[in-house]
Image (cartoon, rainbow, N blue to C red):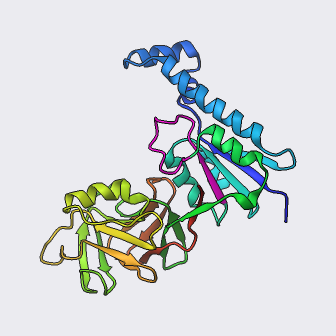
């Protein structure tokens, strides 16, 4: 077996971005003061992340390889099968990383315990350091979290940990034909629709965007993070002489898929809120959405 490599993923802190924008600490402090904020709070958060990163770096076994990558560079970073991913930051950063993985174990590390929900960043820096210090990859226990995948008929594909959105780039009316699987409430119908787009969510995403939609629809039961099921919702379907509003929600089991045939000049597909990293489908193209084949292996 090849020597493991620990890949530490983080994002730039607010302090670093303020200094990039305002050049000096004094100017950054003035900018924050005009908005009723203190630079000390920003400094404290920066320090907590810096300390967490230092703790993780120091705990890596001496014979392991190390690498670091910022969130903005993930799409250009080459991961290998031997990598162990240490994500230091908020829960959303784990979701951002998930789409680039192929079964590598992920340790979610919360640099600010108590400030984040901790759904995906479940370890304190000290706990993560203890996990790594042993140097035994085999003892890392993982929970497999369901993912969702959207595929265009030209082979382009996009995966996400929370949810996939299909709709207009500016959230205007999206026109398409929706085909739902036969086991859903919809009875396997096909319907032309004009809506604000579709959301297809995993159990992990069922605590976020999808949860708010489900609450508005009466609070339907949603999948758990490890369930091999997806929940889907159509946003604001518009009934008209040529479009319907009866296929607006359902559940996808393993092997089932939604089929969306584009009837607009252009629709976009993106995952986990990352609108800049998206697929674009034009008139007549078909988009299929189903369970992902690569679950996220989150170290517990």
Residue 168, above or below 51: below
| Image quadrant containing the C terminus | bottom right
Residue 192 picture location, percent across and down? 24, 78
Q: Residue at the spot x=48%, y=45% of the render?
A: 118
* Residue at the spot 56% in from the left edge and 32% down from the top edge: 13
Left or right: 243 in relation to 137: left
In x, y percent, where is residue 182? 31, 87
75 to the left or right of 283: right
x, y percent for residue 131: 70, 48
- Numbered-mark total: 0
In what quadrant of the picture does the N terminus appear? bottom right
**Residue 21 shows in the view:** no
Which residue is found at the position 32% from the left and 81% from the top? 180
Q: Is residue 176 visible?
A: yes
Q: Quadrant of residue 267?
A: bottom left
Viewer-proximal residue among 226 and 197: 226
Give residue 250's position: percent from left, percent from top: 29, 74
Please name whichever residue, 201 or 14, is drawn nearer the observer in this view of the structure: 201
Residue 119 part of the magenta segment? yes
How would you classify the magenta stretch by its main secondary structure? Answer: loop
| Residue 244 falls left or right of residue 181 | left
Residue lying at 57% horizontally and 36% vertically, measured from the top left: 111
Which residue is at the far left?
A: 241
Q: Provide the residue span drawn in magenta.
A: 105-122
**Residue 151 forms part of the magenta stretch:** no
């Amino acid at each position: 077996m090849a020597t493991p490599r620990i890949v530490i993923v983080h994002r730039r802190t607010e302090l670093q971005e303020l200094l990039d924008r305002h050049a000096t600490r004094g100017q950054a402090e003035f900018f924050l003061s005009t908005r009723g904020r203190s630079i000390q709070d920003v400094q404290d958060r920066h320090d907590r992340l810096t300390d967490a990163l230092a703790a993780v770096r120091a705990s890596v076994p001496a014979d392991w390889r190390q690498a670091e990558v910022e969130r903005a560079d993930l799409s250009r970073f080459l991961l290998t099968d031997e990598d162990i991913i240490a994500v230091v930051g908020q829960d959303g950063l784990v979701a951002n990383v998930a789409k680039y993985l192929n079964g590598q174990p992920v340790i979610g590390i919360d640099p600010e315990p108590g400030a984040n929900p901790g759904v995906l960043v479940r370890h304190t820096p000290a706990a993560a350091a203890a996990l790594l210090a042993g140097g035994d990859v085999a003892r890392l226990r993982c929970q497999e979290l369901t993912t969702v995948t959207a595929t265009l008929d030209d082979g382009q594909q996009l995966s996400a940990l929370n949810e996939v959105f299909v709709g207009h780039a500016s959230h205007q009316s999206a026109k398409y034909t929706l085909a739902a699987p036969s086991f859903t409430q919809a009875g396997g119908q096909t319907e032309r629709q004009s809506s604000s787009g579709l959301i297809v969510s995993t159990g992990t995403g069922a605590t976020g965007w999808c949860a708010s939609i489900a609450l508005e629809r009466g609070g339907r039961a949603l999948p758990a993070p490890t369930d091999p099921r997806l929940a889907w919702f159509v946003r604001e379907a518009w009934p008209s002489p040529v479009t319907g509003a009866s296929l607006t929600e359902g559940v996808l089991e393993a092997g089932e898929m939604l089929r969306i045939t584009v009837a607009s000049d252009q629709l976009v597909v993106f995952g986990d809120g990352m609108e800049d990293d998206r697929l674009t489908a034009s008139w007549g193209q078909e988009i299929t959405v189903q369970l992902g084949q690569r679950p996220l292996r989150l170290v517990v």
